[in-house]
Amino acid sequence: MQKEYTVTVYTEDRIGITNRITIIFTRRGINITSLTTAETEIPGVYKFVITVMSTREKLDKVVGQIERLIEIHRAFVHEEDEVVYQELALYKISTRSLHTGDIERLIRENNARILTITAEYFVIEKTGHQQELTDFIKKLEPYGLIEYTKSGRVAIVKWSRRFHEHLKELHTQDADIS
Amino acid sequence: MQQKDVLPMKPEIADKQLAVKPVITGSEAVIRSLIEEGVDTIFGYPGGAIMPIYDALYDFQDQVHHILVRHEQGATHAAQGYARSSGKVGVAFATSGPGATNLVTGLADAYMDSTPMVCITGQVAAALLGTDAFQETDVIGITMPITKWNIQVTRPEDIPGAMAKAFYIARSGRPGPVLVDITKNAQFGEFEYEYKKCEYIRSYRPIPELSQEAVSEAAALINSAKKPFILCGHGVLLSGAEKALIALAEKAQIPIGSTLLGLSAVPVDHPMYVGMLGMHGNYGPNMLTGEADVVIAVGMRFDDRVTGDVGTYVPNAKVIHIEIDAAEINKIVKADVAVHADAKPALEALIQQVNPADHTAWLEEFRAADKKEYDKVQHRELYPQEGELKMAEVIRLISEKTKGEAVLVTDVGQHQMVASRYYRFKNPNTNVTSGGMGTMGFSLPAAMGAKMGTPEKEVVAIIGDGCFQMTLQELATIHQSQIGVKIVILNNNFLGMVRQWQQLFFDRRYSSTEMVNPDFVQVAKGFYIPGKKVTAREDISAAIDEMLAHQGAYLLEVVVEKEDNVFPMVPAGAPITTIRLE
């Protein structure tokens, strides 16, 4: 059955690595719904967090084919309850609306915060799961939402300890893969 | 011939004598790196962006033999043939742009068939990358999904490291093709050269650790089996596990079936060998997958041509899958016991724990099936008394006259299936064919490479009339480099396999499959290669003798039955046990 999964991939820092990973999803006709990447606590090792709608069976095979790539350390498929995850959204609102209604209460109740205020607009930041972030759009609409943007998912795996110890060991080894 | 007299080849010797690393160009570093990796043969074609490397090659002609092909696709297939017959890494050179894109088919073929190959392409200068410069193409992007690894090098000092990794990756673990794209400025630039072989990459584990637990589980399954069956794949050859596989089969009396690419791992006349698996394989090994209770799949990936309908495949069997590539385990067929390991150590460990067994009744079932196939199909194919020549009788004669010891290089289609079915392979690595990709035009250049890789062996290319016309310009290479391959064209003036499907599944609507062919013997003559055309049964034996006795390349065209079909056959997607004998 299709549902949302989080795929995490640990890679070396190499030009083209994103392409190498994504073409494996492309081959099987799987659409990537979000992709976030950044360096991990181990210098030179990057982590990709990818969300997709697919089946477990398909993704187990995809992950095997990703792991086969030379510059990949490991790749995993995670069910919803195996990861703690978060997304971040920014909302740009017309400053004029500050005077209409009770936006202060809205920001407090939704654990959002204001990042900046100019004469024309102000920017609210909110973190959460996708549904909360899109629900917040609806709440802000009466105040004149100018623009909305959202990050991909960042996720931490609940059972990742052993793997991260392995990664730290790698740190002592030669990272040169040029 | 000239030789550079500046420095000895080994950098460590140079270091000791001169206490400095030699300063050389990136181009020279490419050639020296190849020599460090034991390369003595390169197949290639020059062009603008790779000219500095060809210039450097000029000084090393006494150490590296360059074969000038007539199309870069030919270079890749020749490198594949070289690698498959010799076990060494095949090397191909091409220039940027069209030179590089012409490598694509061969790279994809080598990737599917796990063939170790390193392709070096020239690239426009780094400053021009991304500007649509003359003959610039994104060969890294193009070949990403069809190489085991690829890399673009833009600085001369990165060349030795890239070359070392390329060879390490190409030959280790499950082998595969690697492409190294080198910009022109990196070829021209000078640097202090030093070469260190690569033996480790921290994100890459080519040889998985053998799990003793998995071996024990596999042994327990085999020891409990009434009808065990070994499926021998290409991995057995790649791992050098032929003897271990045969020892296991002999100890526990387990019949061995082979995939197309596993052919030649086990001698055809071995008592445990029961034939080829798959769509046009033998009757017994296909039918009896339906009865086997334990299947031991070694170094194979359950291609759809082997399994037929996966849903009904090996319905009564527990599956032991011994496989070096984790991505192949559970990809198609769920493994009850997965032995993620190199085949040879896995089999050697398994033999220790497997009990001697007697499966006489089970082996009898294979022999009965063999007899059925022989009576219904093989006898009339191998020994026809009338009518036009049949492909199978030609293969039988070649097999007899070469004592099954030639390297058989086949192309793709009916002739490939017939050759694979009837050639009686005796020694490992003597079957070279395009399996996964099914690349028409493979065999003429691959045969050149196979002959270069194993010059002491007779190399016979079996080619269909359609396939031959896809890469026939390599006849010029064969003549120029005096490569003594024997070329047999089985000419039915049809794209035979497509025609067979049209007959069986498209109501005999022969859409674009009939060929009006050139005079192949005249074509060969134009390339200064002698040849003969045979149409009559009484002439074929002598013609094969003449071909084999000839010193050097020879082309034999055999006109065979126009609308012959290859049987047995399993229709695509049907259960493998529905294999038809007619």
Image: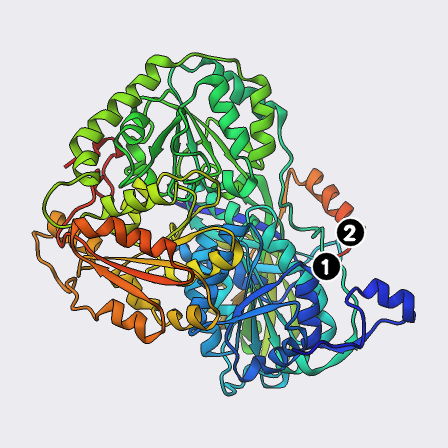
**Disc ID at residue A171:** 2
- The figure's colour scheme reads rainbow
In the image, B133 versus B441, the foreground residue is B441
Residue B62 falls in image quadrant: bottom right
Front one among B104 and A24: B104
Mark 2 — on which chain does it sit?
A
Labels 2 and 1 touching (C-beta < 8 A): yes
Residue appearing at x 71%, y 61% in the figure = B36
Name the spot of residue B435 as percent of width and height, x first: 38, 50
Query: Image quadrant of residue B552?
Result: bottom left
Vertical side of A168 occupied by B132: above or below? below
Q: In the image, is B564 to the left or to the right of A161?
A: left
Q: Nearer the viewer, residue B574 or B443?
A: B443
| Residue at point 11%, 52% (across, down) | B506
Quick one: SS at disc 1?
A: loop
| The one of B269 and B458 positioned closer to us in this rendering | B458
Residue B244 vs A52, above or below: the answer is above
* Viewport quadrant of the N terminus of chain B: bottom right
Specify whether disc 2 shares its chain with disc 1.
Answer: yes
Q: Residue at x 54, y 51 (%)?
A: B86
Q: What is the chain identity of the residue bearing mark 1?
A: A
Residue B123 in view: yes
Left or right of B386 on screen, residue B540: right
Residue bearing the label numbered 1? A44
Mark 2 → mark 1, Cα distance in angstroms: 8 Å
